Structure formats: structure tokens, C-alpha cells
Amino acid sequence: MSSAVDRKKRFVELKSNRIEHPSSISFPPVGAYEHEDVFSIEKFQKTFKVQVIKLTDDHIEFDFVGIDAALANAIRRILLAEVPTMAIENVYVKNNTSVLHDELLCHRLGLIPIYADPRQFDFKFAEDEATDINTIVLSLNVKCTHNPSAPAGASDPNVRYINSTAFSRDIKWVPQGPQAERFAEDPIRPVHDAIEIIRLRPGQELDIDMHCVKGIGKIHAKWSPVSTAFYRIMPQIDILKPIPSELVDKFVDCFSPGVMTVSTDSKTGTKTVSVANARNDSMSREVMRHPEFADSVRISRVRDHFIFSVESVGMLPSAVLVQESIKVLREKAMRVKLELNQLITNSNGETGAGDADVSEAS
Amino acid sequence: MSCGVTVPYYSEPAVKISILPEVDSNPAAATFVLFNEDHTLGNSLRHLLMRNPRVVYCGYSAPHPTEEKIHLRIQTEEGYTAVEALQKSLDDLVSVCDHMLDTFTESVTEFATAIEASEGTADQMQE
């Protein structure tokens, strides 16, 4: 294969006013397939690489190398919309004398992330009864009163009143059946303690029961397990001819900090520039605005190198979310595969029965 | 309180997949309908199908934005059927996911162990 074709396959090139060969060209016309264009799982297993860059419970950054955008995007879409979590779905308002009416209050409650492992629960379908394996019960009971020990003339509501704000930490878990035992080590609670639900004044009261169920972000964003999940495609910067010493500083300023490195000859004072870390570049293409750098640099992206960044809302650690998203994709394929086989067997069965009738008649 | 209207927050379709009727019954071409699916599965399958040299044509579409389904069109060369091609792509997708999960888990474990080890040495240095 010529090196030009090879470049087209591996890189998406950025020009000053356009992007060259952006879409994948691994799909040649029938008969023109080269060995590497044909999908085989053995080849995928050889070329696919994962590298973790940063890892905390809240945030993971990792590289997927040797994968097509279709699959990388599937993972991203599943993270946003199809990894299940638990969220408040039904709210039973027994008393609400606050300034916010029930509907708005319920909406605010629904959006509070609940720390509960969704893998320990079942989906509750429309026809299902609420049980301890598909529902979590929470209650919120807050009453605002005057603070009898407040100094005279105090103006701060937090001093003058007791419970002047209802916080997410006021939401209490009401274990059902064996739940208390099952989740004893890691009790169910709101992920964050200090989310303001509503401000109250003396005499105002909330008395609310809530049912949490398992759901997915596709139905409502409150079930989305990530604050952000995105990928960038790995930048690749090639310096094609040496940058003159006097232009080096200007050249370096065209890129994001840390992308270029400058070495200075101790005797002559000549500066030479080289690429230190293309990964950091924002791909601003600033360098292409300066005619003196025309033809001296080539900027492209590595087509099959995806830099993922996933931030968890807090119900599950970020790495677990990625694992779950891969499982969801696998589950989708398995489901279709089973139902397809069933469809084929059923239709074969029908024609088979028809044949039998014919032979009987003859 | 429930006001008589129930919105299903999670449901599974009774029928997951069907095949659109064709004018002639050539098994080398078929349009599959996948219910409750979108670009996530549609584009992944299209990618894998198009890298199968025996598939002559493959494309997918979401016929209407409010209908939760996609159409997946597959045409194959003689002696191979659209159903076989779809089955192969589904098998491939499952294997891809298995390998992705294993590789990812492995590198996360590796990374976490490395962090722990380096923290361990940092603690020792402090001591």
C-alpha cells in the first residue's frame, strides 16, 4: 500500500479552512478489500489498546487505541443515556406549606443524585408491584421554627430560625425488608449532603415520602450516571522543516502550553523546537494564520486513538461506569442475536409446517 | 400521588426485531427493524457489517425521530444471506465487547496497583 493511502487511513488532516478525508475509508468497494480492511476479532485483539491516564472515583481519563469511531461513540452514548442508576420517581407529598408548589418541589427532589448501587436492584416495570428489590423509600420531614436562643436583633436567618433551609442531608432512607441488612455497610443516602432543596421560614413544613426506582438517562436526565462523558481524537503534529531560531518563540505560542519544547544551543544561542506532547494541543490551527509557517508544519488527528474523559455523578466510581457501559452494549447485541435466532426458527417452523400439510394431502 | 396517568419510565418492547416485507424473496437482501434501538447499536453494526467483504451494501436509518426504532438494510453477495451477515456482526460485536471489557479492566487494575505502590514508597520516604 502506498504511504499516501496509509496516511489517509491513519490520520485526519487539518488544513486552514477544511478537514481532509474526515470519514473512515476502511470500506472499499467489493473486491477491492485489502487484508487489513476486513474485520476479524483476532486482529482487533492484537491492535486494541487501553491506557489509563488519570483515575479517581469521580473522574477517569483513558485512551482507546485501535477502535473505530462507531464503537467509541456507542460507548460514549451509552454512558450518557443507558447505564442505569437509581433516582426518585414517585413523590408522595403529605404536607408542603413552603413557598414552592408541589410540582416544582418534586422536580427538584427527582434531580438529587441518590447513592445506591443500581446493580443491586431490578427494573420496576409498569405492571410490577413495589418491592424491596426494585424500590428505595426515602422520607423528608423538615419543619422550620424560631430559634429561642437567637440573640436579639440577629438578622441572619440561619441564626434566627431552626431549619431555615432544607438540605439533601435531611432526606432519610427508610429501609424496607432486608434492605437494612443488605446495605448496612454502605447505607443509601444522597450523594451530596449540602444540596439546597428549598428555604423555609417559621411555620413552614415539608412532610414527604419518596420512592426511588431504577431507570436510564434516555428516559430522564436524572438517571444519567455521568456529569460529562466525552472523547477527543489524539492530535498529531509533524514539523516538516526546521523553524528559524528567531521565529521559534512565535511558533511555540501558536500551540497550547506544553505542546512544544525549545532547546537552546549553549554556545551559539540558536533555538530549535520540537514536539513534546501533542496530546495537550487544542488544535486551534493558529499556526496556519502565519504565512511564514506555511508548509513547515502538518496538523492531523490519529483516526483510531480516542482520549476519553468520564466524570461520574457519584453513584458508581467512574471506572465501573465504563465497565457497565461495555456490558450494556454487549447485552444489546446478545438480545438482538437471541431474538433474531427466534425469528428465523419461527419463520422456518411455519414453512416447515406448510410443507408437512402438502405431503399429507398428496 | 398518582393522578390516573402512568408514564412508563422503563419498558422493553414485545417484539425486538422484525424483517420488512420484500417484493421478491431473495435471502441476499433484507431490511431489519430493530425496536428500542438507535445510533448506538445501528452505527456499531453498520461499521462491522461494512468491514465484512461478503456484504455488498449496508446502511441504517432512524425512520422517524419519535419512533424508537431503526432500519438496518443489508445486501450480500451470492451464496451468503443477509441474516448470516447480521448474525456474524452480532457475534463480532459481542466478542469486541468482551475483549474491550477485559482489556479495560486489566489496565485499570494495573494503574490502580501502580498508584498504590508509588503511594507506598512515598509513605516509606516520609517515614
Image (spheres, helix red, strand yellow):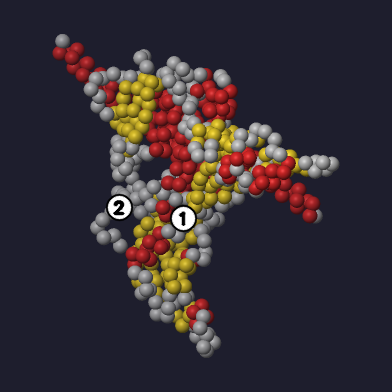
Identity of the amino acid at label 1? Gln
The residue at 35%/54% (across/down) is A130
Q: Is A291 placed left or right of B44 in the picture?
A: right
Taking the image as drawn, is residue A236 in sight? no
The residue drawn where x is 42% and y is 65% is A139
Quarter of the view holding residue A62: top right
Residue A138 showing in the rendered view: yes
The answer to whether residue A147 is above or below residue A217 is: below
Q: Residue furthest right?
A: A267
Determine the secondary structure under disc 2.
Answer: loop
Which of A178/B63 is in front? Answer: B63
Of the pair A350 and B56, the residue shown nearer to us: B56
Label 1 SS: helix
Q: Is residue B46 left or right of residue B66?
A: right
Q: Is residue B31 above or below residue A225?
A: above
Q: Is residue A62 above or below residue A316?
A: above
Disc 2 chain ID: B
Q: Where, by quadrant of the figure, is residue B72 drawn? A: top left
Pointer 1 indicates a residue of which chain? A
Q: Is residue A169 left or right of residue B87?
A: right
Q: Are marks 2 and 1 on the same chain?
A: no
Q: Residue B14 appears at what percent x and percent y?
A: 29, 38
Query: Which label sits in the foreground, 2 or 1?
Result: 2
Residue A179 got which mark?
A: 1
The image shows residue A104 at horizontal and vertical percentages of: 36, 65
Q: Quadrant of the N terminus of chain A?
A: top right
The residue drawn where x is 43% and y is 20% is A29
Q: Which residue is mark 2?
A: B7
Between A48 and A297, the one lying in front of the other is A297
Q: Position of residue B37 (x, y in %)?
A: 36, 38
Residue A159 image position (x, y, % from top left): 52, 80
The C terminus of chain A lies in quadrant: top left
